[in-house]
Amino acid sequence: MEKKKIFVDGSAGTTGLRINERLEKRSDVILMQVDEDLRKDPEYRKKMINESDYTFLCLPDAAAIEAVSFLDKDNDHTVIIDASTAHRTNPDWAYGLPELGKEFRDKIATNRLIAVPGCYASGFNMLVCPMVKMGIMGSDYPVSVTALSGYSGAGKKAIEFYESDQKTEDLFAPREYALTQKHKHLPEMKKISGLDREPLFTPVVDDYYAGMVVTVPIYTYLLKEKLTPVEIHQKFTEFYKDSVFIKVMPFGKEEEYSGFFAANAMAGKDSAQIFITGNEERILLSARFDNLGKGASGAAVQCLNISMGIDETTGLVL
């Protein structure tokens, strides 16, 4: 197989760096070397994008939109894999969570425009999309979600604050944010899951580097079909039975965690775990993964592999 040329636009950021780490040891791709003096120059970026077979966009939204505009009209080969928020609800783009169904996987495999999901939205859609697709939860269910993340998902400046000798006292504690319910992941949470309205969302960032838990609480009496935790666990196990990257964990093993559930247990991995806990009245659906792995860079490389038509686990850490 001819080696594919890869350009990472925004390679200095957290997501870009980790994509480079996943690709630099591979023999089937060539990472295009970026001239640091020109990496923000529009003409240089345009040249690199159009010369590449695959371009990863690890950029703010406006810069990602600009980068897509750089594609030449006669360019019939470059595939764009965008890690920004800019295109995740655009129907012309594939949504990069193939485990949600054959239609998601097929569109990733055939579309030249692929949007990588947001980290919080990945966990949310792993949990809520199957519930809606399987007819257990109505699209009008009043969903709420709480999520805890390491600080690496907040970007380079936030990482510097957290790791600085001048770190302020508040950074040692968990911090809720997006209190106005305007978080940038909310539109894709609603659209991809099939809900009628955006969920109530409480994101929390804490004083550890990487790892995330996304939890959706469920009242069983509000479901279209009232099921026990065991029955819902069986449904999720069936839904994800063919998935390599998303594993539904054994039911009833909570005691192994001594009553505690660490959000950083999947740090460094590109896969995710799903847990079903609770009782017959109130159930917790939880997804645990690395916000930089299955929540960002790992998902981007998985999309690359699917687009290339090779083993989707190539170069990734399960």
Image (cartoon, helix red, strand yellow):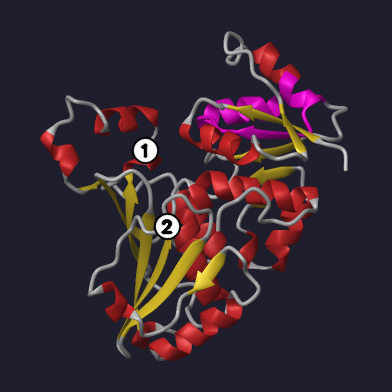
Above or below 72: residue 53: below
Quarter placement of the N terminus: top right
- In this view, the residue farthest toward the left is 169
Quarter placement of the C terminus: bottom right
| Residue depicted at 39% across the width and 41% down the height | 153
Residue 145 figure quarter = bottom left
Residue 79 figure quarter = top right
Spatial separation of the CA atoms under disc 1 and disc 2: 18 Å
Q: Nearer the viewer, residue 123 or 221?
A: 123
- Mark 1 surroundings within 10 Å by alpha-carbon count, few (fewer than 14), some (14 through 19), many (20 or more): few
Amino acid type, callout 1: Ala
User: Of helix, strand and loop, which one carries label 1?
Assistant: helix
Res 293 visible: yes
Whether residue 58 appears in magenta in the rendering, the answer is yes
Residue 263: assigned label: none
| Residue depicted at 65% across the width and 14% down the height | 42
For the record, the magenta segment spans 48-72
Above or below 265: residue 38: above
Above or below 291: residue 83: above
Residue that badge 1 annotates: 154
Q: Does 161 sit left or right of 193 as displayed? A: left
Residue 65 figure quarter = top right
Q: Does 135 sit left or right of 119 as displayed? A: right
- In the rendered image, residue 189, in percent from the top left (x then y), is placed at 48, 57
Residue 266: assigned label: 2
